[in-house]
Amino acid sequence: MTSTEMTGEKPKKEKKQRKPFSVAVRERGFLRPVFLFFLSLFATSVLLYVLCRLIPDLAEFWARYPSHWIRFVLAKITTWIPFSVAEWFVFSSPLLAAGYFVFSGKSLKKNDTTQNYHRWLNPLLCGLMTLVVLFCTAIGPCYFRHSLADNLGLKDEEVSPEQLKKTAEIVSGELKKLEGKISYLSDGSSIRPYGYDEMIDRILASYDDFCADEKHSFIRTFSSSPKRLASSKIFTYTHISGVYSFITGEANINLNYPDFIRPFTVAHELAHQRGIAKEEEANMIAFLICINSSDDYIRYSGYTAMLQYLMDALHAADQKLESAAYAEFIPMTYRQEMKAYSEFFRPYAQSTASKVVSAVNSTYLNSQGEKKGTASYGLVVDLAVAYYSNTNINTQE
């Protein structure tokens, strides 16, 4: 007989000792502290992104300051790596995914427990959430910042065919000033008179000058190294001349395209790296960077690219005015450059890859508020017309 039975007292229930929170979470398997940390980052970044879509002032603030530092750090981390990390990731991701499923499958066969299942699933989910966090903090809000027209003090209005023709005439005049300063091959294509690294240095110098002006405080620049795509010829079948990776912070350049396209492409991808997300706005910044360069060939690249956009827009708007423009003022050197470019591009023009990439890119751009999808690249003409309509703008002599 126990002492409690002898005294007639009821036995006391032992108090269950509470486990520390961290131990309890660890025992649950799935909701581990690291996973909860990534989940909180994911939820916070998505909330930020949604708020930026609704509040342009917040998006502008985030694009100028917090987002700038995220893009800056990513670019600085990868700029010292001699190859494109983004390109490596694109081509290795199928192998990495296959390896993950093979090894996780074998592990689960040997030890088919909930804990082992969570051990393999958690890193995958954390990795996917990291991609969303990077998008929602580094580049996503930049799509919803104040328009470039507002930041530059331009009137962004729908333009008429006559205005397109007039702007094309101004740009053609600037190209004519450069005719004696540019070298050409026998097929009419121009030649860049220096190497890739020197081109990058000159474009970065133009960015430094542009951003030093207080009127351009909405964009901040820094030194970075746009990466050469090792698979440039393959990428040409997708019609991609350059691409910015928000995951790695890298601007990537297709070296298979003709010389005259590269300076403009570099300036365009660097604009994305500096928080100009919309395609037509990145085109406009690239144009301004190029034409304000002290280098003749970089200016030539900027004016040639813009004249392409203007003439394409004029063709769509009024083919009679387009024909008149060709007859009146389009330089012969530009016509020869475009003829050589058409010959270069012929093998890539109707590729299946380009149609798939264009569809995917259009869907992505639509989701970020660019309602015309890939057609938004050409909307730069509206900004160009507004730029040259501004009485305070003087073209470079």
Image: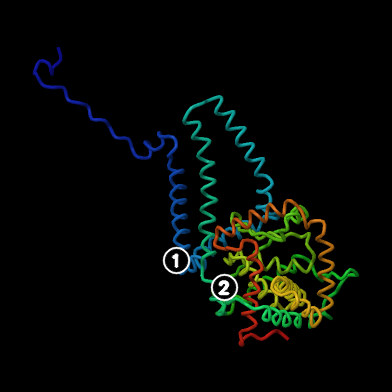
In the depicted view, which residue is nearer to us: 326 or 120? 326
Helix, strand or loop at label 2? It is helix
Helix, strand or loop at label 1? It is loop
The residue that mark 2 highlights is 148
Image quarter hosting the N terminus = top left
Q: Which percent across, then down, holds residue 225?
A: 67, 62
The CA span between labels 2 and 1 is 16 Å
The residue that mark 1 highlights is 55
Q: Residue 239's quadrant in the figure?
A: bottom right
Image quarter hosting the C terminus = bottom right
Q: Residue 184's quadrant in the figure?
A: bottom right
Q: Is residue 270 above or below residue 128?
A: below
Q: Which percent across, then down, holds residue 384?
A: 65, 77
Residue at 61% from the left image edge and 87% from the top image edge: 392
Residue 120: give its label.
none
Q: What residue type is labelled 2?
A: Leu
**Does residue 325 appear to the left or right of 7 in the view shown?**
right
Q: Which percent across, then down, holds residue 252?
A: 68, 59
Q: What residue type is labelled 1?
A: Ile
Q: How crowded is mark 2: few (under 14 residues within 10 Å), some or many (20 or more)?
A: some
Q: Residue 361's quadrant in the figure?
A: bottom right
Q: Residues within 10 Å of mark 1 (few under 14, many from 20)?
A: some
In the depicted view, which residue is nearer to us: 111 or 43? 43
In the depicted view, which residue is nearer to us: 356 or 57? 356
Q: In this view, does 304 lie above or below 90?
A: below
**Does residue 312 appear to the left or right of 109 in the view shown?**
right
The colour scheme used here is rainbow
Which residue is the extreme one toward the left? Answer: 7
**Does residue 185 appear to the left or right of 233 in the view shown?**
right
